[in-house]
């Protein structure tokens, strides 16, 4: 029995002034809960991850809890007072946005996004089978595969239709048929990224070895491995044309099918079967040999991987990391460990509105096309709280990303100190 005024234990999570005992409890959303056990404040994370879930509130109320001691709820230092003010401001902003309907989805936008995918796939397949424009066809098909990734990402955040079950089914369909990958695997990993972006041993997007090291804190591990000492110094040159393709094929052919089989995700297995049946039918309708068809498939997946992974890398990978034993406020994670890319109608389309990473990390369940209009309010909110609203030109961010890859890679080649 823990006394009411006792400090937070390693099994307790702080949410809105109460400490919840999660010892032995299996969180339906995966292992992300452990990032807040015994330290930090999970209030904003809980609200944003479960903004559209009534079941989460029921789960929370069923857990044993106690009122948090004043040392956790009453700010004592100037830093604690600053964070309390930031939390209050963020809460007020969020409540205003909910009341104004910012989290409601638009069915017409949903239909447009789906129709675009079908139209681009139809165009690419027609060009591949019925014309001599093989390379343009593969570019179209690669880009639309990447755009399936943008769409499934939004559905995985329950910001596509706004209906949790429907969004998950939409994600499984487009990620399975369009990309050959698993929505269940993505959800189990991506929550960790949003809970603690750029935090060592927490953010899964930093766990990229042996093929990539985005920062020197990770790269130091590679200096002990002969393959990584050979590979990582070249990573800036290999990332777009080689590494992204290897990752995409590795996910398609091993990592995601293994996850589907382990978790017995029969619907996802069905969508993978549909994907490969369609690919076989397209090959059968063409005049391509088996070797030509295989080469086309490799190129199609490689283009799609380069398109989406390179664009994803622009928003975080070149920024600082958070030490594994330190915490940051939810808003500070968005302000200090993400950047926006200068908006433009083409950039917004090209990046699936995820050039607004700051807004996305603040409100991950908000429909992403609404970030265009929301951006000025977030800029003002940041200014009021002394936070930097970091916006960079697309090609400047590309330069930062590849410059960082080159610098980190070069650090691996340096001789280790005795």
Image (cartoon, rainbow, N blue to C red):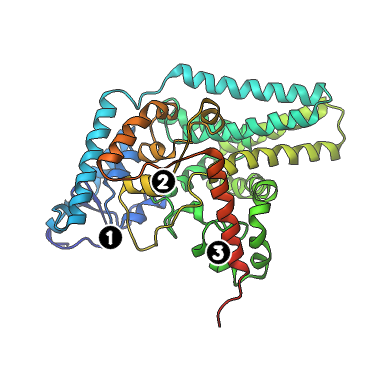
Give x and y (percent) for residue 91.
23, 38
- Residue 412: which quarter of the image? bottom right
96 shown above or below 36: above
Instruction: Provide the residue designation for mark 1.
Output: 38
- Determine the residue positioned at 50% across, 30% down: 169
Dot 2 alpha-carbon crowd within 10 angstroms: few under 14, some 14 to 19, many 20 or more: many
Instruction: Provide the residue designation for mark 3.
Output: 219
- Determine the residue positioned at 63% across, 54% down: 236
| Mark 2: secondary structure | helix
- Residue 158: which quarter of the image? top left
Asked whether the beta carbons under mark 1 and mark 3 sit within 8 Å of each other, the answer is no
Nearer to the camera, 378 or 66: 378
In this view of the protein, can residue 51 be seen by the observer? Answer: no
Asked whether the beta carbons under mark 2 and mark 1 sit within 8 Å of each other, the answer is no
303 shown above or below 317: above
Give x and y (percent) for residue 331.
32, 45
Instruction: Provide the residue designation for mark 2.
Output: 194
Q: Earlier in the sequence, mark 2 or mark 1?
A: 1
Nearer the camera: disc 3 or disc 2: 3
| Mark 3: secondary structure | helix
Give x and y (percent) for residue 99.
25, 25
Give x and y (percent) for residue 360.
41, 37
407 shown above or below 276: below
Q: Earlier in the sequence, mark 3 or mark 2?
A: 2
- Determine the residue positioned at 38% across, 26% down: 373
In the image, taking residue 211 as reference, residue 355 lies left or right, namely: left
State the separation of the CA atoms marked 3 and 2. Answer: 22 Å
In this view of the protein, can residue 99 be seen by the observer? Answer: yes
Quadrant of the rendering where the C terminus is positioned:
bottom right
């Amino acid at each position: 029995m823990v006394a009411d005024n006792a400090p937070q234990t390693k099994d307790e999570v702080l949410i809105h002034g109460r400490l919840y005992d999660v010892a032995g409890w299996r969180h339906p959303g995966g292992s992300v809960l452990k990032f807040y056990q015994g330290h930090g404040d999970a209030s904003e994370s809980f609200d944003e991850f479960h903004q559209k879930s009534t079941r989460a509130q029921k789960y929370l109320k069923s857990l044993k809890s106690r009122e948090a001691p004043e040392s956790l709820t009453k700010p004592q230092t100037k830093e604690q007072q600053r964070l309390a003010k930031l939390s209050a401001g963020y809460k007020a902003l969020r409540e205003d946005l909910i009341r104004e309907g910012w989290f409601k989805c638009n069915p017409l936008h949903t239909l447009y996004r789906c129709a675009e995918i079908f139209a681009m796939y139809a165009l690419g397949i027609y060009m591949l089978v019925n014309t001599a424009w093989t390379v343009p066809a593969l570019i179209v098909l690669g880009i639309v595969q990447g755009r399936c990734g943008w769409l499934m990402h939004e559905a995985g955040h329950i910001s596509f239709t706004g209906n949790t079950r429907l969004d998950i089914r939409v994600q499984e369909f487009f990620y399975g048929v369009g990309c050959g990958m698993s929505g269940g695997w993505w959800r189990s990993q991506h929550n960790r990224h949003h809970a603690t972006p750029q935090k060592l041993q927490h953010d899964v997007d930093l766990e990229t070895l042996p093929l990539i090291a985005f920062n020197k804190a990770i790269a130091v591990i590679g200096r002990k491995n002969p393959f990584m000492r050979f590979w990582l110094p070249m990573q800036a040159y290999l990332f777009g044309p080689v590494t992204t393709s290897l990752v995409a094929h590795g996910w398609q052919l091993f990592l995601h099918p293994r996850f589907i089989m382990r978790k017995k995700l029969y619907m996802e297995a069905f969508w993978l079967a549909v994907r490969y049946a369609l690919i076989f039918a397209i090959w059968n309708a063409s005049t391509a040999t088996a070797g030509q068809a295989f080469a086309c498939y490799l190129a199609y997946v490689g283009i799609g991987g380069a398109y989406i992974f390179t664009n994803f890398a622009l928003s975080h990978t070149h920024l600082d990391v958070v030490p594994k034993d330190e915490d940051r406020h939810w808003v500070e994670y968005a302000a200090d460990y993400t950047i926006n890319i200068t908006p433009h109608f083409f950039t917004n389309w090209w990046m699936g509105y995820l050039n607004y990473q700051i807004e996305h990390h603040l409100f991950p369940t908000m429909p992403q096309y609404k970030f265009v209009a929301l951006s000025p309010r977030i800029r003002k909110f940041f200014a009021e709280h002394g936070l930097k609203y970091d916006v960079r030109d697309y090609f400047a961010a590309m330069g930062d990303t590849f410059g960082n890859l080159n610098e980190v890679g070069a650090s691996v080649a340096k001789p280790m100190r005795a």
